[in-house]
Amino acid sequence: MGRKTAGLSRAEYRRRVRAWSLYDWANSAFAVVVLAAILPTYFVEVAGTSLDSPSTAATYWAIIVAISLLIVAVLAPVLGTMSDIMRGKKYLLAVFTIVGATATGMLFLVSTGDWLLAAALFVVGRVGFGLANVFYDSLLPHAAIEDDRDRVSARGYALGYLGGGIVLVGAVALIVLLPNDDNQGVRASFVLVAVWWALFSLPILRRLPEPPAATAKLAKGSSVLRTSFKRLGTTSRNVRSYKELVKFLFAFLLYGNGIGTVIALAVVYGAELGFGTVELVGALILVQFVGVPFTLMFGSSTNRASVWRGTIVTLLVVNVIAVPAVGIAAAYTLDRDTVGRLDPAYPAVDEFLGEGEYESTAEGIVFTGQWQTLTPDELPSGAGSDYVLAGAAGARLDIPFNGQRIKIIHSEGAAHGIWDVLMDGRPFLKDGEAATIDAYRPTVRFGVPETFKADTEGLHTLSLVATTRAHPDSLGNVISLGEFEVLEPLRTSDLGLILALLGGVLGVSGFIALAFGRKLNSVAAAMDTKRSILMMLVVYTGIVIWGYFLDTVIEFWFLAWAVAIVQGGSQALSRSLYSNLAPASQSGEFFGFFTAVARFGAVIGPLLFGGAVALFDSSRPAVASLAVLFVGGGLLLSRVNVAAGMAAARHQDITALSYPRHVEGGLANYGRPESTPEVEESLRKRRGALDRRQVTGARDDQEL
């Protein structure tokens, strides 16, 4: 390998790359289980039950997430610059990994009502996760040579998908297998994440050398922190020297937020359209595991030395064309029950209420006993609507409806009792037993949801009856109702056929790629990193536009497959492209900026989505509006001159090599190619001087 492994043996280079990639495998457990799958729901439904309503708990959660992102955004550039100056990338990676994993493990202590403890531990864990990623990403140019960074970055993301998926399956197993008392399974899953994260962080800390520092000796009286701020100021003043990198940052600010918004809101959007738990959870798992091979393929698609390049690119292109084509064609040619098309809305029939949302005072509800109506102004904080209440055993309300499922919103409190639930005059059975609602809790809480499903579609009556039974600490037998909703029809689909069609698309695209791909190597040679990202942004634009028209279960699965094709690759190649545009000698500082831009800009996508919902009163136009981020980001990215940006980074790195300390660790010359013809002649002369040890500039024994 020689030059292509920067002077390292092939085996040592591979060991370093493997060690670096495994950190994605380690920390993705936090991203998947804590950030996405379990903790948000656990916070609202368990830790936040001491708050006055689930909506309040959800609002608090959003604020807590925003605070954690703000802390990371503020600290990332400063600490990243410090890691360059103090030769401390691995040290700070270890520190924040320990901080994050410890806080995650301590989430085991969070039980019912402990929202403040959950918030504090989450913020610490999220900050640890975010800042550790700064130093992890900044080690990429010190672990992989320039021409290999696409592959290595993609390998990291692929391992992250796989590792995160494995831990998610393990967490679900713990939740199912452990006793439900005090949510033991959920709390144990946090410990699993912490152990996984800490354990698989060891290879990068043991195997990868600490990169060299980016300074000579500090002046007397100067501190690392003060010098870091000076360095940040210098970089900001000289930002014109990195204009291609800045253009890329603005492009990533747009399209990166589009990707993040799709990830964050896909399940919410699917639930709003009426897709069931099987579809929502299944799509999440599909993206997690199908993303692995496609991320690896995008990482290899830019490898100019690969004889399989044409085959890989052909497979990717055929998939991104065939998946939406087959999904949409099947949705409009197969029968309704096969593809999961929504049935028409349930109409009102005489006194039976049809599909829709209703206030507790809606006509048609039959009240038995002494009931009173209280407005939000007459109730404690948290009540978002009028509530009807009765305080004596025997009080009853009957809701006649046309449909199959009905969701009610009620309150809980110290004076609430236990209510029987009847469907069509008979006890409603849940897990074979008569269902009841125990509405006692020490403090008042509004907005508590309950959903009931009749055996068949049709005309039904849901009844709630206040009993003489109550919690031992309850002060009364209060029964209440806020709002209720007759839900849309359930979607039915043939999951086996859907998965078979997806497998067929993959099989046919694989055959086409093997049959014709090698003949297209010359065409595939045009797919460099930037063009690959642009292609994925085109796919993302199509995804969000398709999302606007989405109306069947089969389309939801095919859309999830399309996301799986591009989600990992787009992020992996963006990271590797940025690492090539940024000076490796200041990788901590520049990846700190990268993180700050991503975190400060994280509000763009949700604000655009929320604004579109407010304007159109629907999530469909909001999803389509995300195309603005992908198109805008793609246009900016198309204007990035990658060669000029890389030349500027090499200029800075060659200058940095005037400090002897820079050759103590990491890859020789930061993994830059030995031949840099695009660097001006003066720099070549400077490099020659360095090769002859005719070092100019500050030395280890001189002060900055």
Image: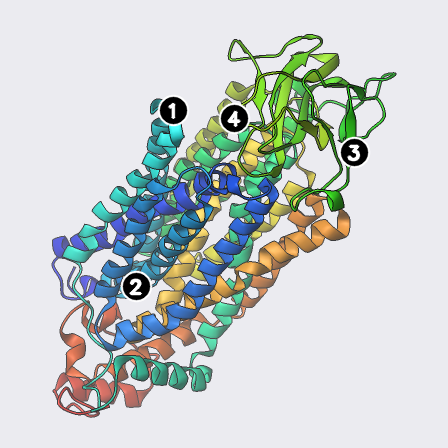
The residue most toward the right is: 350
Query: Quick one: quadrant of the N terminus?
Result: bottom left
Q: Disc 2 on helix, strand or loop?
A: helix
- Looking at the rendering, which quadrant does residue 391 occupy? top right
Tell me whether circle 3 and circle 2 mark residues in contact (CB < 8 Å): no
Q: Amino acid at mark 3?
A: Thr
Mark 2 and mark 4 lie on one chain; the one further toward the N terminus is 2
Query: Residues under labels 1 and 3: Cα distance?
Result: 41 Å
Query: Upstream in the sequence, badge 3 or badge 2?
Result: 2
Q: Is residue 501 visible?
A: no
SS under mark 4: helix
Q: Which residue is mark 1?
A: 176
| Spatial separation of the CA atoms under disc 3 and disc 2 | 58 Å
Q: Nearer the viewer, residue 116 or 234?
A: 116
In front: label 1 or label 4 = 1
- Pick the front one: 537 or 617: 617
Residue 642 shown left or right of residue 430 in the figure: left
Q: Which residue is mark 4?
A: 278
The type of residue carrying mark 2 is Phe
Q: Which mark is residue 135?
A: 2
- Going from N to C along the chain, the mark reached first, 1 or 4, is 1
Q: Nearer the viewer, mark 3 or mark 4?
A: 3
Q: Residue at x 66, y 44 (%)?
A: 380
Q: Which residue is mark 3?
A: 373
At horizontal 70% and vertical 52% (from top left) the residue drawn is 612
Q: What is the distance, in whole Å, between disc 2 and disc 4 at their CAs? A: 38 Å
Q: Nearer the viewer, residue 326 or 375?
A: 375
Give the percent coordinates (x, y) of residue 583. 33, 74
Q: Is residue 15 above or below residue 285?
A: below
